[in-house]
Amino acid sequence: MLLLARRVGALVLAVGAIAVWFGLEPEESSTGTADYSSEIADAMDRYEMNNAMADSAPQQEVVNGWVTKDLLEVIATAENASLSPETAPRDDRVAAELLLVVLGLALIALTAQGGPTTRGADAAASAPVAPSGTGAAEPDTA
């Protein structure tokens, strides 16, 4: 009876795992990606203008630092927009699958056969006795 309950429970958990995986699939973000091409173009235009006016290597280093700062600012803005809670899809499947694992462990615990097996005195008393010798009676020589 416990074996049947275990098999039925395992089947229910397997079907539940498949249903959770496909049923709780996060929806694709409908917000799309923002276009930062104008900010990038502005940074590159300022770079070209400032680089044309740079007369020495130290001035070019400063210009390169400015364009790097401007482009990193654009990258940071884009990353913040993509990781905000409003735009990032939420995936609840892992938590639901872990719940199914806990339910599976509970099923195993509830359908386990009762008590540990006894070995020792009870096992020795019920063990078959092997015959010793040839089995023929030996004559008494005394």
Image: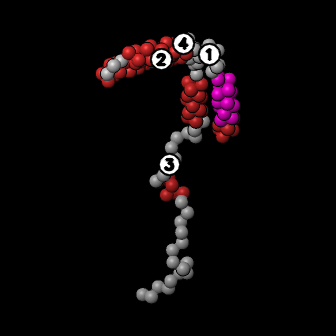
Residue 55 placement: quadrant: top left
Q: Which residue corresponds to the image point at 50% horizontal and 85% vertical from the top-left?
A: 139
Does any portion of residue 36 appear in the rendered image?
no
Q: Is mark 3 on a helix, strand or loop?
A: loop
Q: How is the image coloured?
A: secondary structure
In front: label 1 or label 3: 1
Q: Do the residues labelled 3 and 4 touch (CB within 8 Å)?
A: no
Label 3, on which residue?
A: 118
Sequence-wise, which precedes: disc 4 or disc 2? 4
Residue at image mark 4: 38
Q: Which of 116 and 132 is in front in this view?
A: 116
Which numbered tag is attached to residue 44?
A: 2
Q: Distance between the residues labelled 3 and 4?
A: 79 Å
Q: Name the residue under label 1.
A: 32
Per the image, label 1 sits on a secondary structure element best described as loop
How many other residues sit within 10 Å of disc 1, few (<14), some (14-19) or many (≥20)? few
Q: Is residue 33 above or below residue 12?
A: above
Q: Which of marks 1 and 4 is nearer the N terminus?
A: 1
Residue at the image position 40 percent from the left and 18 percent from the top: 51
